[in-house]
Structures are given as structure tokens and as C-alpha cells.
Amino acid sequence: MGAIKVHDKSFDIYLSEATIQERIGELAASINRDYAGKRPFFIAVLNGSFMFASDLFKQLTIDAEICFIKLASYKGMKSSGNVVTSIGLDDDIFGKDVIIVEDIVDTGKTLHDFLPKLEHQQPASMRIATLLHKSEATTYPLTLDYVGFDIPNKFVVGYGLDYDGLGRNLKEIYQLAG
Ligand code: IMP
């Protein structure tokens, strides 16, 4: 499957299923090594990160916990600029080694706005794992500790990422054509 259509737009294949899975294996190996003897607490940001969080979590060989939160700043293809928390964090992260799991960091605003709320709860440490990073588009200062792929500033869908609600079920990642 080389090219697809989602709503009114055409997308070309960008990252194959095998490429994504291989890279996730490498990220998990780094986390297994870095957190040996610890018990990291993963906070996966819904909706987009559900596939990445699941595949990454399955590759862990250390003890680990996971919970899901929902933040949203996107409508269609453009960030609305407002970060809304619609499912809050119920768990106490005081003293825990937190790893935030994101599908994609674009401008960085979502995490930049959200991190102080987590820091307020005084975790022992906090790192970020993101499958995709549009580094050219990132204007908010953020330290990303585990990055799957640095990608160009073009809209992508698939593997959890949507275009107006569709495309999340694709096993591969596709890039807007043209
Ligand atoms: P940021 O706050 O600008 O970093 O945007 C982060 C959020 O925007 C991600 O969690 C995604 O939900 C969404 N997003 C950014 N770029 C894309 C894209 O290319 N495709 C689909 N969603 C995207």
C-alpha cells in the first residue's frame, strides 16, 4: 500500500510497520537499560499514543506501570493553541520515575503546558518518550529523552495518529502528499 486517501487528502507511505516496530524495540531496549532496578510509571497521552504506548510497553522486561491521560490541542490540521485536559491523572506520581509517552511532538506546546502540572506533584524524575518529533516545528523548549523518528514538518497519519478522526487504525505512518 503506497498511497492512501483520508477524507479529502492523499497521503504517501512514510514509515513501514517493520521500521516502526524495529525502532520501538530499540527505544524499549534503552529504557530497559536506563531503568534497570527501577519501576518507571508511564503516562501515555491519548488519543494518538495508544498504539505506540502498547507496543513499547510490551517490549519492556523491567517492572513498569502505565496510565493514560487525555490532552488535546488539535482540530483538523492546525493546533488550536489551547491545551485541554479531558481525562485527568488519578494516580499519585509523588516520588515516581515518570516517563511521558507521546505519539508526536510538533510545536511542543501540549507538553510544555502540561509538564509543570506534573512537576508540581514532585515525581522523582521525569522523562519524555515520543515516537515522532517534528523538530523544525518545535518552538517551545522541551527535552525529549527518547525519540523514535525526527520527521519533516509535514502532516502525518496512521499508527494512532489521525486526520479529523480517521487514519488511526493504519499500521504504517503516511505523510501528506505533495
Ligand atoms: P504540539 O502541542 O504542537 O506539540 O502538538 C502535539 C499534538 O498535536 C500531538 O499529540 C498530536 O495529537 C497532534 N499532531 C501534531 N502533528 C500532527 C500530525 O502531523 N498528525 C496528526 N496529529 C498531529
Image: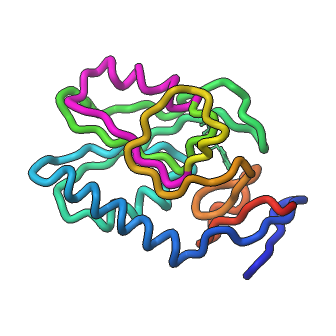
Q: Is residue 141 left or right of residue 59?
A: right
Considering the image in quadrants, where does the C terminus appear?
bottom right
Task: Name, please, the residue furthest toward the left.
Answer: 37
In the depicted structure, whether residue 46 falls above or below residue 139:
below
Colour mode? rainbow
In reply to whether residue 148 is colored magenta, the answer given is: no
* Viewer-closest of 174 and 89: 174
Q: Measuring 53% from the left and 29% from the top, which residue is drawn there?
A: 85
Q: Measuring 25% from the left and 49% from the top, which residue is drawn there?
A: 65
Task: Name, please, the residue furthest toward the top.
Answer: 120
In the depicted structure, whether residue 86 falls above or below residue 63:
above
Considering the image in quadrants, where does the N terminus appear?
bottom right
In the depicted structure, whether residue 144 falls above or below residue 16:
above
In the depicted structure, whether residue 21 falls above or below residue 163:
below
Q: Measuring 41% from the left and 61% from the top, which residue is drawn there?
A: 54
Q: Is residue 56 left or right of residue 73?
A: left
Magenta residue span? 109-132
Residue 170 appears in which quarter of the rendering?
Answer: bottom right
Rendered location of residue 31, percent (x, y): 27, 55
Number of numbered labels in the structure image: 0
Rendered location of residue 93, percent (x, y): 25, 31
Instruction: Dividing the image into four quarters, tell me where ligand 1 lies.
Output: top right
Rendered location of residue 7, percent (x, y): 85, 60
Rendered location of residue 131, percent (x, y): 50, 54
Task: Name, please, the residue furthest toward the right.
Answer: 8
In reply to whether residue 126 is colored magenta, the answer given is: yes
* Viewer-closest of 67 and 133: 133
Q: Measuring 57% from the left and 51% from the top, which residue is drawn there?
A: 48
Task: Name, please, the residue furthest toward the front.
Answer: 136
Q: Is residue 140 left or right of residue 37?
A: right
Q: Is residue 62 left or right of residue 17?
A: left
